[in-house]
Every structure is written in C-alpha cells, then in structure tokens.
Amino acid sequence: MKHFSKPLSLYEIDLLHYTSVASDKEYFVDALILKALDENGDKVYERNDKEKLLKLDKSKLEKMYFEMFDNELS
C-alpha cells in the first residue's frame, strides 16, 4: 500500500516531538498513525495499530514515513 499525507502543521510537529521521546522508531510509528492516508484521503492507521507497527523494522518504518511525505495530498 502506498502512503500519502497532508503537510504537518506546527502543532503536529510539536506533538510528535513531545510524545515520541523513546526512539526514532516510535517517532515514525506515531507520525504514521497521526498522518498516514490512503489515496482517497482516508486514515490508514489508528492508535490501536501502534504495537503492530512497532514490530516492523526501523528501516521499513522510515521508508513508509518518507514515502508518506513524498506523496502529500492537498
């Protein structure tokens, strides 16, 4: 599945920096939960997906994170 996103707001940037303090991996997961959309603009992940996402390799999460922001929806 290809990930999309809308641009991060200043509030969302602050939120991610204050809530994802454990690791880069957790930051990527929290950002995906907060911002990942499908091609129709619907949310892909919910809070209850966090544990499942944390089981993925950091490199996979990082790729998903950057893909999401490379495909911004307006």
Image (cartoon, rainbow, N blue to C red):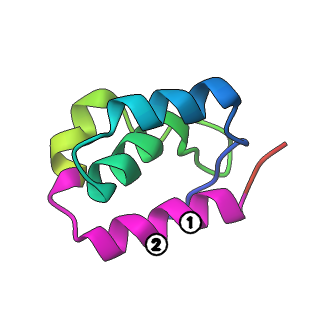
Residue 60 highlighted magenta (yes or no): yes
Q: Is residue 35 above or below residue 52?
A: above
Question: Could you say which is closer to the camera, residue 17 or residue 1?
Answer: 17
Q: Residue at 70% of width from left, 31% of height from top? A: 9
Helix, strand or loop under label 1: helix
**Which residue is identified by label 1?**
66
The alpha-carbon separation of the residues under discs 1 and 2 comes to: 5 Å
**Residue 2 visible (yes or no):** no
Circle 1: residue type:
Phe
Query: Does the magenta stretch mainly form a helix, a strand or a loop?
Result: helix
Q: Residue at 25% of width from left, 39% of height from top? A: 49
Is 22 positioned to the left or the right of 8 in the image? left
The x, y position of residue 70, in whole percent, is 69, 65
Helix, strand or loop under label 2: helix
In the drawing, what numbered circle is on residue 63?
2
Q: Residue at 22% of width from left, 71% of height from top? A: 57
Residue span colored magenta: 54-71
Res 62 quadrant in image: bottom left
Is 1 positioned to the left or the right of 19 in the image? right
Question: Could you say which is closer to the camera, residue 12 or residue 50?
Answer: 12
Q: Are marks 1 and 2 in contact (CB under 8 Å)?
A: yes
The x, y position of residue 47, in whole percent, is 30, 29
Circle 2: residue type:
Lys
